[in-house]
Image (cartoon, rainbow, N blue to C red):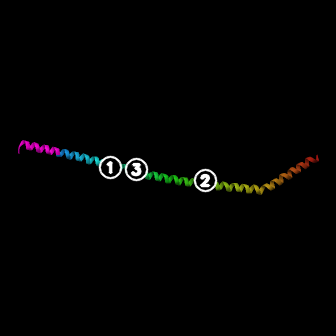
Amino acid sequence: MKLSEVLEALLKAEDEAGEMRSSAEREAKEILQKAHEKFAQTQEARLAVAREEARAQVESTRHSVEMETQHIAELAQKAREKMQEHFDKRAPELIAKMTEKAALEYAAHGRV
């Protein structure tokens, strides 16, 4: 084998090694890019799930607050109705007693 043939074989091997290295670098970059894209998609999916869970939690809380508000309003209405009933029941008797007392005082003052 001649020196030129050996040199040619070495240069060819070096070119092949360079091509293999370039190919490996491209493949590695593609793998990294795909991994980054997959990670981003996974993160976005997780964020979407978290947003949906938060939205559901807020909706549930809003519904609970509405139900509690309605219950409080109903209790307040019942309390007002009970006070009105108590007033309606006691007022005539109190007014009669106050009127009688005023009349007695008026009559007592009128005699003097």
Q: Which residue is mark 2?
A: 69
**For marks 3 and 2 on the same chain, the one whose residue lies earlier in the sequence:** 3
Q: Which residue is mark 3?
A: 44
Count numbered badges in the picture: 3
Indicate left or right for 52 with 99 as reference: left
Reply yes or no: does residue 102 show up in magenta.
no
Q: Which disc is residue 35 wearing? A: 1
Q: CA distance from mark 3 to mark 1?
A: 14 Å
In the image, which residues are magenta? Answer: 1-15
Asked if disc 3 and disc 1 are in contact, CB closer than 8 Å, the reply is no
Asked if disc 1 and disc 2 are in contact, CB closer than 8 Å, the reply is no
Few, some or many residues within 10 Å of mark 3 (<14, 14–19, 20+): few
- The spot of residue 96 in percent (x, y) is 83, 54
**For marks 1 and 2 on the same chain, the one whose residue lies earlier in the sequence:** 1
Indicate left or right for 111 with 57 as reference: right
Tell me the residue at 11%/43% (across/down). 8
Q: Nearer the viewer, residue 1 or 43?
A: 1
Q: CA distance from mark 1 to mark 2?
A: 50 Å
Amino acid carrying mark 2 in the image: Thr
Amino acid carrying mark 3 in the image: Glu
Tell me the residue at 41%/51% (across/down). 46
- The spot of residue 60 in percent (x, y) is 53, 54
